[in-house]
Amino acid sequence: VGSIVLTVKEGANVRRMDDCGYFAFGGSTVVLLFEKGAIEYDHDLVENSRKSIETLVQVGSSIGTSAKKMKIYNYDNFPTVAFQYF
């Protein structure tokens, strides 16, 4: 995938399973969706996005930090970790 082409406008109402865009061929792409205001993106991603410049993000690279304070509860009887935002 070389780029992502969005076919919906910002603010449009979409429902589960609605088509919102498509991948154009060319390289690899991973799409991450976050609730608005949940993440503060790294400066380089913001600046490059404003200039429509592709940014190489490798496995383990930072893309941002949580904008919300988060408590992490580790329950030994559960196979996952529970997160609580406040």
Image (cartoon, grey):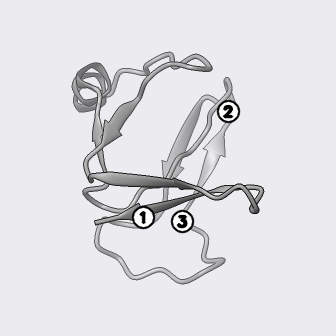
Residue density around tag 3, few if under 14, some if 14–19, many if 20 or more, within 10 Å: few
| Residue at x-position 68% and y-position 27% | 28
* Residue shown at the point (52%, 47%) measured from the top left: 32
Using the image as rendered, state which of residue 42 and residue 79 is in the foreground: 79
At mark 2, the secondary structure is loop
**Amino acid type at image mark 2:** Val
From the image, tell me which residue sits under label 3: 20
Mark 2 or mark 3: name the one nearer the start of the chain: 2
- Whether the residues at callouts 2 and 1 have beta carbons within 8 Å, the answer is no
Q: Quadrant of the C terminus?
A: bottom left
Residue 57 locus on image (x, y percent): 52, 20
Reading the image, the residue beneath label 2 is 1
**Distance of mark 1 from mark 3, alpha carbons?**
30 Å
Residue highlighted by disc 1? 84
Q: Residue at x 41, y 29 (%)?
A: 63
Query: Which disc number belongs to residue 23?
Result: none
